[in-house]
Amino acid sequence: MSMELRDIGPPDYKKFMHPVLLKNYGKWKSHEHVKPGVIKHISETGDVVYTVRAGIPKFISTESVRFLCDLADKYCDGYLRFTTRHNVEFIVTKEENVDKLIKELEDAGYPVGGTGHSLKAIIHCVGYLHCNLAATDSPSIAKALYEALYDYFKRTDLPERIKIAVSGCLNMCGATNASDISIIGVHTKPPRVIDEVVHAQCSPMELVKLCPTYAIKPKRIKKNGKVITSVEIDPEKCMYCGNCYAACPGLPIHDPENDGVSIWVGGKASMTKQGIMESRLLVPFIPNHPPKWEKVVDIVKRIIDIYLKYAKPDERLGEMIERIGWEKFFELIDVPFTYQHIDDFIFAYKEYRKGISFRFTKHVK
Amino acid sequence: MSMELRDIGPPDYKKFMHPVLLKNYGKWKSHEHVKPGVIKHISETGDVVYTVRAGIPKFISTESVRFLCDLADKYCDGYLRFTTRHNVEFIVTKEENVDKLIKELEDAGYPVGGTGHSLKAIIHCVGYLHCNLAATDSPSIAKALYEALYDYFKRTDLPERIKIAVSGCLNMCGATNASDISIIGVHTKPPRVIDEVVHAQCSPMELVKLCPTYAIKPKRIKKNGKVITSVEIDPEKCMYCGNCYAACPGLPIHDPENDGVSIWVGGKASMTKQGIMESRLLVPFIPNHPPKWEKVVDIVKRIIDIYLKYAKPDERLGEMIERIGWEKFFELIDVPFTYQHIDDFIFAYKEYRKGISFRFTKHVK
Amino acid sequence: MAEILEELKRGKWPSFVKELEKTGDERIWKYYEKCLVDKKPYFGHGGIVGVTGYEAGVIGRVAIEDAAKILPEFHLFRILPPAGLFYKTDVIRKICDWIDKWGCKLLQFHGATYDMQAFGIPREKLDKAFEELAKIGFDLGGSGPDIRTAACCVGPALCEWALIDTLDIYTTLMKEYIFDVHRPRFPYKFKIKISGCPNDCVSAGTRSDFAIIGIWRDEIKIDENALKQYPSETLEMVAKRCPAGAITYKNGKFEIDNEQCTRCMYCINVLNKALRPGDDRGATILIGARARGRYGAFLAWVLVPFIKLKPPYKEIKELIDKILDWWDEHGNPKERVGETIYRLGFGKFLKDIGLEPKPQMVYRPRANPFWKYF
Amino acid sequence: MAEILEELKRGKWPSFVKELEKTGDERIWKYYEKCLVDKKPYFGHGGIVGVTGYEAGVIGRVAIEDAAKILPEFHLFRILPPAGLFYKTDVIRKICDWIDKWGCKLLQFHGATYDMQAFGIPREKLDKAFEELAKIGFDLGGSGPDIRTAACCVGPALCEWALIDTLDIYTTLMKEYIFDVHRPRFPYKFKIKISGCPNDCVSAGTRSDFAIIGIWRDEIKIDENALKQYPSETLEMVAKRCPAGAITYKNGKFEIDNEQCTRCMYCINVLNKALRPGDDRGATILIGARARGRYGAFLAWVLVPFIKLKPPYKEIKELIDKILDWWDEHGNPKERVGETIYRLGFGKFLKDIGLEPKPQMVYRPRANPFWKYF
Ligand code: SRM
Ligand code: SRM
Ligand code: SRM
Ligand code: SRM
Ligand code: SF4
Ligand code: SF4
Ligand code: SF4
Ligand code: SF4
Ligand code: SF4
Ligand code: SF4
Ligand code: SF4
Ligand code: SF4
């Protein structure tokens, strides 16, 4: 095999860019939200292009990809792009093509939307479909949410955008650390320890080091007359993160009864206004319940209803909550505030409420 | 010796309170700042009293105390009190007595002031005068500052109050953790280890535990043929807090060459507005230079000048700095920004500036 | 006196060195002078002294090296003051006479914790001196790993904003815990401070393990007529600075959304003729301040968002007892209660002492995904 | 298909299960169905696979237990995409043909990092498949403890706010570090993300170890005529919400104090016809994000407040090299660079890599009194 085809790096983007974009590269002047899913980009040169954004499934067959290519050939001179949120974007240089393209997309079942103050594409990781660590199945959760929230993708009259993300586990591959609403898979029991496998395949000292809560200790035991080295897990300290299982098959953590999802709110990745906001815990645990995920859908809908009711114009969910106070939000959403909501990790002290600056809610009878 | 005089607790405050105060206890309606050092308290009953506040030295001879008692007898029916900032307060029920009292106080050298938006009494600890831990001498620093800032104690036209505190060491007995300006004694070298004394008088394991930076390790060494237990101090880790010396005379940390003061700004103890604010490091180290403390005085004066120039009405120093930005304040005060200013302790991560929300100053060329 | 001390006698502000001079006790200023010149203190670790039956309240000082010749010992009494730091002159004169007789004519009104301090009582006179002090009606305060002398603001005695009876609470708690003030038995010191309102004139939020802060739960009272006396720039400024965004001032109308208000006192402070705290009064209990601790400075945080406070303050005592028991069991030596809570987890602490978790206890729910189900 | 999968095919949103169906490869949906029913995934720890010469870019999956019979292996390629995720249809069709031939007709546009993903290439075909992919002009992306596939926003290609050439920087850096993308040798993964402005459309601040964010240093440009088109409520809202308090809107006059502005983009976003970023452009470099880390989530913080960025981006490469060397030396296994910095001290890190401390790097100077003099 020829080695000169190694390390060639990414292809040259210029070769894949519509000539109008190349011509106006760095010369854009402003944009307009023409209608849901359509942005008009205006250049200093006077040129105008439209991007038409459509939702696609994250797992997509070549058959469907070819269909998208057909449309791009027909309406966009053979160019298309994808967004950082995994939507497809058609760059249309002829205004009259916009509606035709939209019609074909919609007819084929690809919703056009997700621009401006709308529900954006739901980011999710591969989940059960390709991952060995998933505590929950992110793709099916995303699908269930899309069904329930479909209209919001095509509306642009929300107070601000709503971004939802789903991660199958705490590794957060699905952008769940800073989304308006995040669904994250969680385990709730420590891993089991299969001593023989730990002994044969894993390094106890590595395991000791990678546990964030210092729950793992090495141990030496006798099994069938042989001394083997394994580890012990302190159930008082383990916080079920799955780090150790990721490194060692001898510590299985999957548990159909006790795995499930947590729901988080109020994150924001952009640096605008008060800056980045981290997602924060709303519901610590709901057992897995595919394929409809009714309970998750219900909570998410309630969050959005409150958002639509209380948010001021231009206010992201997290900004709204900060304004009215988290205690007030917990009262409105009527989800129990539990021990799990109180941080007890390294930076926990910073989260304690210093002074008397809280609001009265039903929590203070 | 009779044991029934044990554990009697505090005396009954009611016995020490002017009858007019007892009568109006809990009935006060409002107050007015009549002039510097004088507050008029108005009761719902229609009664009116004046408090006249004067500065006194924190170490006070019985001779001087008796003089204050004489004044209280003459103008206040024999009642007086002290404030939580160690001023004396005379409660005057007859308006005509206010100015007479003030005159006698001022004539005797006790400045009347410290009310409203003024420089408040400077809180300081005992320092060299009674403490074994002092890295600097707080009483003389306070005296030097008072001389330089005397007038501010008697003015009430500052943007807001200015609170200064001085602690002889990191123990912060002098309220230095949340004052507008704090002077705090610091060591800058690790303690020396006198093995014999550690062995004879201290517990190595206790020392290991109380060092906040894990700089102390126990050791066993041979000295003159005998095995003794002592400790080792890692100079890379020690942050000179003096905890270990406080517990063990075998670890002397006093060092005339390398002890000195640090200067901190922006603290506030009250829960008003944005709440409590912690004092933050401005100058990491100035060698001790009694009795005039010119360098300390110079920096403090510069801080106050900037405060007077930039603060908006009702704005404490820390609030002003938060508004203009710490980077801007460092530019104005022209004090070098050093490695020491960047937190590197447990909660350090929370202090790093997330995102791009800074202001341009000369630090960014 | 050497020049270094002469310098400290000069100037307008009353000089503490002149006070040392007035005691007539040369040893004191000579000792102090040596420290200033040598740039270090000369007290050693000796001088663990006390009065019979107590293990706290006396700070013993024995000088070392050359300084031992100047001022061999220099012990002081921490004296529990009356609530509000109110005195009659007759009792102060008695204190003066007393320290003139037993010590070296030097006092402090007061220490940073709240104690009156009396200097220079020789070791062999400690017991006698204490006995005479007790006869004047005073007791010793705290030191070491005990319940320290509490502190309270002047509160209802002089201030219109007092929402709780700070003086009565101080006195009640000090009486209740007086045994533990004098007999250190905890992991470390435990300080109680009581402020009548969130202005916190006793710095409870920054300097006490257990802070009691008076608050109100209903609406801020507005006197519309008095409000009119304030210039519109003032009203505008107050509305703008309200940290809770609770105030609107538009078209001459000043309105407070009391649901949003976080009781910071600011508007009331500035517009004190027009605004007053509400009538449904009680306290917020905060826990865990330490000026400089193991992990840096700790400020006090919400433990009980709201509690009604009436004599005999049974609930407060029960709460303190539960906290002390828990801390006694779990605390490491030299660990303040807030740090023990932080180390073991605030949630666990709440569970152990039987308090419900409430969103008011934290600014926000957790952002990190490591937690326990318990 | 069982009901559980049928349910996921229903509804208006395009169904990924239908896409699985379209591949015609029953093994995939049968496997997935089993996971959903049993509520757990069935991939084990086996399947460490790769293409010759690379140690990254392929995620191997081998099923265990009963599932092994259904879908014995299910490897995927992470493919380095072109900057901006722009494609011509001819090249996409080539990719489709390619995966139809070598894998199982399933793609992802794109993974959360930025890679295109192609599924189901059997172990024995990996090398061949890769060779053909390279012929189409594509290379593999990162996985494991290496420099990961970078990511950039659409930037100057379509967006008026691009203050740096995100696409060019992405391409340059990926070319520069391509060797380290394919050969993991660091303590853990290292992600670079590049956003053209602080809107941060690529989430660099929350999801990358090394974030490059376009900013400007001079004044926001105001088109006064365009400004007049906005209703005064909008202008008022923007002035009120400016996080830096830099905007005043009074008596119809909208003014920006550019010294106060912290470049959050908010006013520009809302008033995009009237306001534009300034002309003195460059980038802020941030360091250390990790979505969920050893200590909880880490967000990226300021490392270099301002740097001019021009090809060939020499300074950026030198900076990255210094950081990688330092991290390589000091980092623990599975420790992202931000965590190594936090553990050893940001000051020490700066000193070691030769950067001056600047107040822009922290919100505030330290509040805790433990520090070193170095
Ligand atoms: C196409 C895309 C960049 C790309 O390289 O692919 C993009 C494009 C634009 N973004 Fe974005 N953003 C894109 C992902 C993001 C992300 C990342 C993400 O969603 O994962 C963020 C940060 C996420 C967050 O804040 O939680 C992001 C935060 C913004 C913001 C700031 C929003 C805020 O809350 O303040 C703006 C400004 C605005 O819209 O006013 C913005 C504005 C824009 C503008 C208006 C810029 C322009 O002048 O063209 C573009 C159209 C926005 C729209 O959808 O209405 N874009 N934008 C990404 C579209 C993703 C999608 O398919 O939905
Ligand atoms: C007498 C005293 C209470 C006592 O029990 O002794 C007291 C008394 C009053 N305080 Fe205070 N405060 C007293 C220490 C404090 C402290 C503690 C300290 O200084 O160590 C604080 C918190 C410290 C801080 O914020 O850094 C404090 C924060 C306040 C505030 C809030 C200030 C702010 O920054 O927002 C007010 C409200 C105001 O003045 O508008 C206040 C208001 C008041 C009022 C106006 C209350 C009233 O209606 O009578 C009293 C007169 C204030 C004045 O001096 O102008 N008092 N006050 C203390 C006087 C100390 C002194 O001699 O200077
Ligand atoms: C006298 C006084 C300073 C003053 O001049 O006013 C003082 C003096 C001492 N303090 Fe203090 N502290 C005094 C109030 C404080 C305060 C302020 C307060 O209580 O509001 C603090 C900070 C608040 C806090 O508790 O965090 C304070 C924090 C400390 C610490 C650090 C405690 C900690 O948790 O880190 C020590 C060190 C220790 O306990 O080992 C300490 C230790 C000491 C010792 C006992 C030093 C020692 O271990 O030998 C000092 C005795 C000096 C002497 O020779 O008289 N002192 N000390 C104050 C007590 C007088 C009184 O009872 O009224
Ligand atoms: C495919 C992808 C999710 C997706 O569906 O899009 C993914 C999938 C996996 N991630 Fe991820 N991560 C993916 C983007 C991310 C992101 C988002 C990003 O890069 O912006 C994050 C959070 C950002 C960050 O880096 O902190 C992320 C944080 C993790 C972590 C936690 C890393 C950490 O520092 O804590 C792990 C665990 C690990 O590395 O051991 C992980 C591990 C994994 C592994 C390799 C699990 C494993 O160790 O076997 C997953 C393989 C799944 C599979 O079988 O294909 N993945 N992973 C994304 C990569 C595709 C691509 O290259 O484009
Ligand atoms: S978030 Fe967890 S389940 Fe999802 S891809 Fe990443 S490691 Fe796998
Ligand atoms: S699951 Fe996480 S917390 Fe529990 S033992 Fe494993 S690594 Fe430690
Ligand atoms: S701050 Fe330090 S020097 Fe001052 S009294 Fe306290 S322990 Fe002594
Ligand atoms: S001075 Fe403080 S940091 Fe240094 S060894 Fe002693 S206890 Fe540890
Ligand atoms: S804390 Fe409140 S009640 Fe107490 S004196 Fe200060 S202002 Fe008055
Ligand atoms: S008390 Fe404070 S929070 Fe409440 S309305 Fe007044 S200023 Fe606002
Ligand atoms: S980050 Fe800025 S430059 Fe890049 S696409 Fe988003 S708005 Fe445009
Ligand atoms: S960019 Fe942001 S900080 Fe700057 S003026 Fe506009 S809103 Fe204010």
Image (cartoon, coloured by chain):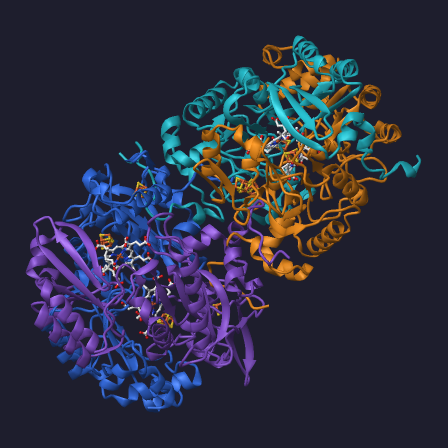
Chain colours: A purple, B cyan, C orange, D blue
In the rendered view, tell whether residue C359 sits above or below residue A111: above
Q: Residue B348 placed where, x, y %?
A: 45, 47
Q: Does any portion of residue B157 appear in the rendered image?
A: yes
Extreme top residue here? Answer: B107
Q: Is residue D36 left or right of residue B181?
A: left
Q: Is residue D314 left or right of residue B339?
A: left
Q: Does any portion of residue C335 appear in the rendered image?
A: no
Q: Residue B168 placed where, x, y %?
A: 59, 29
Extreme right residue here? Answer: B2
In the rendered view, tell whether residue B103 sits above or below residue B162: above
Q: Residue D214 placed where, x, y %?
A: 24, 48
The foreground one among B341 and B10 is B10
Q: How many marks?
A: 0
Q: Residue D99 placed where, x, y %?
A: 17, 80
The quadrant of the image that shows the N terminus of chain C is top right
The foreground one among D75 and A143 is A143
The foreground one among B48 and D78 is B48
The quadrant of the image that shows the C terminus of chain C is bottom right
- Residue shown at 39%/72% (left/top)? A168
In the rendered view, tell whether residue B292 sits above or below residue A302: above
